[in-house]
Image: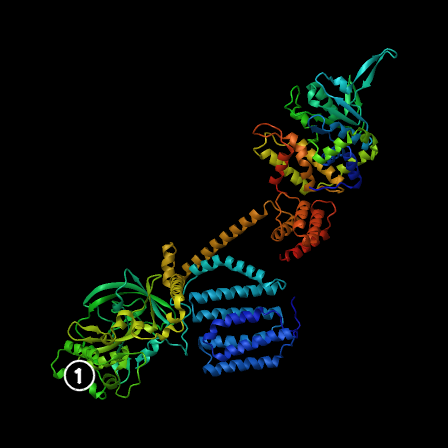
Amino acid sequence: MECRYQERFETVVDRISTVVLGKQPQIRLALTCLFAGGHLLIEDIPGIGKTTLASSLARVLGLGFRRVQFTSDLLPGDVLGVSVFEQKTAAFVFHPGPVFTQVLLADEINRATPKTQSALLEAMEERQVTVEGQTRPLPRPFFVIATQNPIEQSGTFPLPDSQMDRFLIRVDLGYPDRASERFLLELGETKSHLMRLETLLEPEEIGAVQAAAARVHAAPALVEYVLNLLEFTRNSPEFQVGLSPRAGLALLAAARTWAFLCGRDHALPEDVQAVLPYVVSHRLRKAKDFRELTADEAASLLARVPLP
Amino acid sequence: MIDMDPSAPFDKRPDLPLLLAVALGPHVTWLPGWITVWCLGLWGFVLLAAHRGYRPPGRALRLILAGAGLAGVGLTYGHLRGMDAGVSMLAVLLGVKPLEITNIRDRMVTLFLAYFLVLSNLLEDTGLGMTLYLAAAVLWSLAVMIRMNHPDLTLVPALKRAGRMLVLAVPLTAALFVLFPRLPGGLFRLPDPAVRVIGFGEVVAPGDVGRLVQSGETAFRAEFEGPPPPFETLYWRGLVLWQYDGRAWRRSPVPGPGAEPIRKEAIHRYTITLEPHHRPWLFGLDRALGPPPGASYAGDHGLVSARDVHNQIRYTLTSALEYRTGPLKGWERRWGLGLPKEGNPRARDLAASWVADGRSPAGMVQAALDYFRNQPFFYTLDPPALGPDGVDDFLFTVRRGYCEHYASAFAFLMRSAGVPARVVVGYLGGERNPSGGYFIVRQADAHAWVEVAVNDEGWMRVDPTAAVAPQRVLRGVEAAVDEAPWRGFWTERRLGWVYPYWLQARWNWDRLGLFWTRTVLDYTYERQRSWLARMGLKTGTLADTMKNLVVGLAILGVTVAALTALIALRRRSPRQDPVREQYDRFARHAARLGPARPPAQGPRDYLSAFSRARPDLAPLARDITDTYIRLRYSPHGQPSDRKRLSRLVRTFGRIRR
């Protein structure tokens, strides 16, 4: 569905697209994900602009940004932080890890061992970190952008289904189109542009936007529609497992945020349809070959569920 | 919508006057001409007045008009009894009625009276063509009634709705048709003082048959069980004429019943569908072996129905084409020789000369036939008039005439020569309808022949016309004369290459009409009883019949209710809220005007798809969609939005392409 965000969010999208060229839909979805209070999974090959997207988001929204390159020898402490014995004070002092930020780019998360993966995922879910018996809250907002190489690549530890479910939205960034790429090549690099991006939203505003998006009206007819969609995935023989209730909550939350960013105080079936492919594709597996769906395949189920 | 102002101008719409004209239509053929003029004139005035904005005439003028119309009917008929006068009265009063229509009640009254006028057409004609016409008239009147109650509805949707109502009424009609108790003898048997008689009367004077032959009207249709007999043996026997008064032949009431023939061969069984001719005689192939139910079999083997035939009737007969009736009874011989005392001396002389020659009775028959064959006799439908001694004139000077003249002269000669003879009138031949394989016998096939008794074997048929114009007997009347007047305009010469198609179409239509008669009109009291008995239903008493009717209607009602509920459930499940229903109505109509809405498409997406295809309707569609979204998806829907939505959807529903 064609969508224009309300003015100030449209500005955000515009600014970020001066750095991440030709990726407006993904930028919109990333914003939706952030304002819905979820985390984003980008599944793509390296060098496609994932880091630039994450850092430009952080800059434009005035958020702190950290990046962690996941490798197979990365330990949970490398992400969460460690307590180190300080000679001077003769006490253990906690050195916070990179997770203590507002926008965290977890690059190539599937290269790390499951232990490290789950340490991060726990932080994502709980929005707090417990190290050595002490629980420390993470800054607000806390937004993880994880990237993942396609499964075919060797030396990876694919995320289990239960952890995939923690990501609200999954997008493929994909190659830029020819015009955008030409522009990129002529530009040479985007670093300096990134540095020039000014902050458009205050951190407190982000909390207010998240609260307002959660208040968007979801009418009984709309809830009915979401229920129909969930039921369809559960009854249809083409899926190995249907969508979980958590997926239903995620879908509704994303639809609400999308509606809010479009400037409405109520969600429409079109909002659900706009976000559904990216909310459910990583949560469904085809019964035939046990693969995850692509966004297009997920979109095709929309045509088969009539509006109530 | 309903105007109660007594001096309001006329309704501008021509619905009612047109309906009245449609109802009157078939009556025009027989109603006195002035009634047609009266009705059309008054209705035309009403239409004109509506457009010019004239005020309706006052009560006094209307009363005078009604009185004048009734007086006219009384003067025309001399009485106000019977069907024709009744229908005329109805028509005359309906002519005046539109002058005083001021409110919807008047319109409804007029409409119901129009139904009576429509129905009264069945008193005249129950054929298929009329039935189809009346079905169309009923459809039109339903549409008129619908438009009375929905004044903003245009004609085509009103007709569509009326059609749906008629179709829905078909099962009930069929059930009532099958189950409703039928009256023995039929309902529409209303003898009328001024009946229009077609066919043979009690008396056949020279020229009577000739007049009949001018008519292309169907007398009856005959369907044979098994192969039909050869054409030249198709003598459809009607009346036997015994008395000759010097000019005309006359039927006599004969003591019955007729005796069984002593020898009978070449037996055929067939069913006759007789058109109403308002006389009691029935026709059968010479010679019928017994009467059909409800008729008697006279001593001269004439078939006479208990009642005059005012409606189409069907009966089945068995006939033997070869028969001997045995020796004559005393009264037969006496009656078969009766002649006036005087007149026609030359014919008497001719017969006397045969007697003097000592010829046998058979010889005398041969002599008479030879006389016709050898003298220059000529078969024509247009013979000159005959003088007081008609037989003499015909035999010796004019020598031009048709079957009736030959039969009359031949019978006179035989009686003069002492051979018992009688004239028989009926039909000869008929047109075989290749589509259906039955015979259509028309008035044009009317014929007269003679029966003589030459020995103890009894009456035998002699057709003197065959001696003069054998082709009349062999191939029908059309072969015997140059021009067939009953064909009217539709002759082969005028139609050219269209003629075969026209003929085929006429045959097919005739067959369809016969089918209609056989299946619908012939569903009589007896048929109903036997049919219901076969279905295992008792019909002995009225109570039984009523029980069948009630049970049948109850079954029908339950079935219809169940079907309706099923359809409603299928359409409504799961139960929808009224807002959604309104939107669906919008989407259904929008699909007629532009792209259809896929069931999974959201309202905004559909709006943009529809607006792209129909930018002219975009504002209204946007208004509807916004209101719908407000009511269904947003927290701001107001009760007033519901009214607004249904009003908008109604407005949208009236848009045509």
Quadrant of the rendered structure where residue A74 is? Answer: top right
- Tell me the subunit letter for badge 1: B
Image coordinates for residue B566, horizontal then vertical, percent: 53, 48
Image quadrant holding the C terminus of chain B, namely: bottom right
Mark 1 residue type: Ala
Q: Is residue B288 above or below residue B639?
A: below
Residue sitting at the far right: A88
Image coordinates for residue A95, horizontal then vertical, percent: 82, 18
Quadrant of the rendered structure where residue A257 is? Answer: top right
Residue in front for this viewpoint, A68 or B228 = A68
Rendering colour mode: rainbow
Image quadrant holding the N terminus of chain B, namely: bottom right
Dot 1 alpha-carbon crowd within 10 angstroms: few under 14, some 14 to 19, many 20 or more: many
Residue sitting at the far front: A186
Residue in front for this viewpoint, B636 or B78 = B636
Total marks placed? 1
Q: Which residue is mark 1?
A: B351
Image coordinates for residue B348, horizontal then vertical, percent: 19, 85
**Residue A106 at least partly seen:** yes
Q: Is residue A108 above or below residue B13?
A: above
Q: Is residue A14 above or below residue B489?
A: above
Quadrant of the rendered structure where residue B434 is? Answer: bottom left
Image coordinates for residue A273, horizontal then vertical, percent: 67, 39
Image side of residue B588 versus residue B293, left or right: right
**Residue B252 at least partly seen:** no
Q: Secondary structure at mark 1?
A: helix
Residue in front for this viewpoint, A281 or B576 = A281
Residue in front for this viewpoint, B173 or B539 = B173
